[in-house]
Amino acid sequence: MAEEKTNQPEQQNIEQAEPVAVEETIEEVVDAEVLSEKEVLLRNELEEWQAKANEYLDGWQRARAEFANYKKRIDRDQAQVYQNASGSVIKRFLDVMDDLELALKTGLRKGMGLLGQMGSS
């Protein structure tokens, strides 16, 4: 019987210890659920911000590519304008050079008379 009495207080201590452990476990689970809900909300918010950041990045990259294309187009157009302008200037000088060569071939006095006639017409 002495053994039974000594075992009984130990069992009482175990029985009393278990409810405390269960209550602590329940609190931990509730805390974990609350944390889990907050975690889910934070993850959702993070995903939304990441999507928005990706959208902004995509828009920025497109704008940058459009600007690069615009710059290339402007450079190409300017080169074409320069080429056309220099071509027309060169054509005018070629006409004058042809007239001067013709004047030199026909003689200086006769050629100067021809040039005077060409200039007046």
Image (cartoon, rainbow, N blue to C red):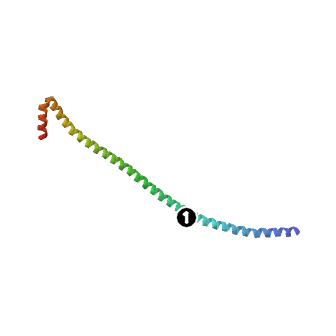
In which quadrant is the N terminus drawn? bottom right
Q: Is residue 103 left or right of residue 2?
A: left
Amino acid bearing label 1: Leu
Query: Looking at the image, is 69 positioned above or below residue 98?
Result: below
Between 95 and 49, the residue placed more toward the observer is: 95
> How many numbered tags mark residues here?
1
Identify residue for label 1. Answer: 41
Residue at the (60%, 67%) spot, across then down: 34
Between 87 and 43, the residue placed more toward the observer is: 87
Q: Residues within 10 Å of mark 1 (few under 14, many from 20)?
A: few
Q: Is residue 78 left or right of residue 106?
A: right
Query: Looking at the image, is 73 positioned above or below residue 103?
Result: below
Between 6 and 92, the residue placed more toward the observer is: 92
Q: Position of residue 97 (x, y in %)?
A: 20, 35
Q: Position of residue 98 (x, y in %)?
A: 18, 34
In which quadrant is the C terminus drawn? top left
Residue at the (63%, 65%) spot, across then down: 32
Q: Is residue 83 left or right of residue 5?
A: left
